[in-house]
Amino acid sequence: MYKKIALLLILVMFVFCGCVKPQKEPVPSTLDDITKRGSVIIGVKTDTYPFGFKDKNGKYAGYDVDLANMIGEQIFGKKGKVKFVPVTASDRMMKLFSEDVDMVVATMSVTPARLQILDFSDPYYIAGQAVLVKRGSKIKGIRDLNGKKAIIVFGTSSEGSLRAAVPNVSIIGYKTYSEAVKGLKQGKADAIVSDDTILIGLSLKDGSLVMLPKRYSREPYAVAFRKGEESEDLVRVVNDVINEAAHNGTLRKLQKNYGIKKY
Ligand code: GLU
């Protein structure tokens, strides 16, 4: 009897001191679960014009957001069934793993490393990495960054390709693109390396910045999911949406509307 009470006391102490943490119940999100829930939760960017941003009325907008809405419409047969969650390059994977979102549509490239831990749809856009400098800079290409400092945004594919192209570069990381631009303008580094789609947006907003003409990688943008059986049906539905939109010209039309072209 005393033994049982002692054991119980020990268990209670463990729970209260946080030694035994109650497990977070996984939020099921197969296609079936999402249909039953009545909405699909999609992570999109808000700092990546024109792919994911907030318009002047504070509404989510952009190429990725339109694609997310098309996915919602395909699942539910009607509009207005997408719940948007803002993500950044640095937290988008975490938000998938922590089940805050069912999928991510956020200028995310398919890379061999990411394929080990995530599932991806077919690509819906192909970008390429480029270099952004201050107007008048002596940097004319990525190799000129040898022995210099370059900025990347945490969680992007830029760091790997930059290191591979320029082994002697010092890399400074920021969490967001606005911080990265501030860093460049304050002279903390000589360039920002990221996708052309993103850098062109930054240079159009700020005339003192110029994107150099060469591309240094191929960045296929695709929708990302948690890896595993749970995502199989979802990936299939999203692939249907992407392939149909590629075939019937919708993706091309969206690119035209948002001024997205090969620079
Ligand atoms: N496409 C690149 C990546 O997936 C960079 C895009 C971004 O900053 O979101 O890492």
Image (cartoon, helix red, strand yellow):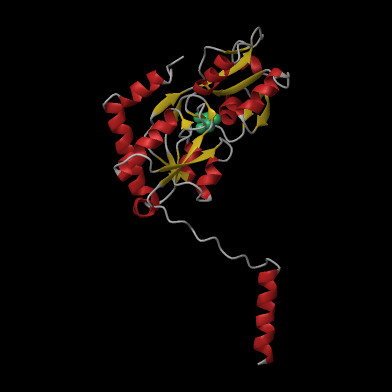
Across and down, in percent, residue 148 comes to 70, 19
Q: Toward the viewer: 160 or 7? A: 7
| Residue found at x 40% / y 27% | 125
Residue 24 versus residue 66 in the image, above or below: below
Residue 96 versus residue 33 in the image, above or below: above
Left or right: 235, with 139 as reference point: left
Q: Toward the viewer: 106 or 57? A: 57
Residue 16 versus residue 149 in the image, above or below: below
Q: Toward the viewer: 118 or 261? A: 261
| Residue found at x 53% / y 45% | 95
Farthest top residue? 136
The quadrant of the rendering that contains the N terminus is bottom right
Q: Quadrant of residue 183?
A: top right
Left or right: 164, with 256 as reference point: right
Left or right: 61, with 13 as reference point: left
Q: Is residue 5 something that shows in the picture?
A: yes
Across and down, in percent, residue 209 comes to 62, 13
Q: Quadrant of residue 7?
A: bottom right
Q: Quadrant of residue 206?
A: top right
Across and down, in percent, residue 164 comes to 58, 26
| Residue found at x 50% / y 51% | 99
**Callout count:** 0
Across and down, in percent, residue 231 comes to 39, 49
Left or right: 166, with 82 as reference point: right
Farthest front residue? 57
Q: Is residue 221 something that shows in the picture?
A: no
| Residue found at x 62% / y 27% | 152
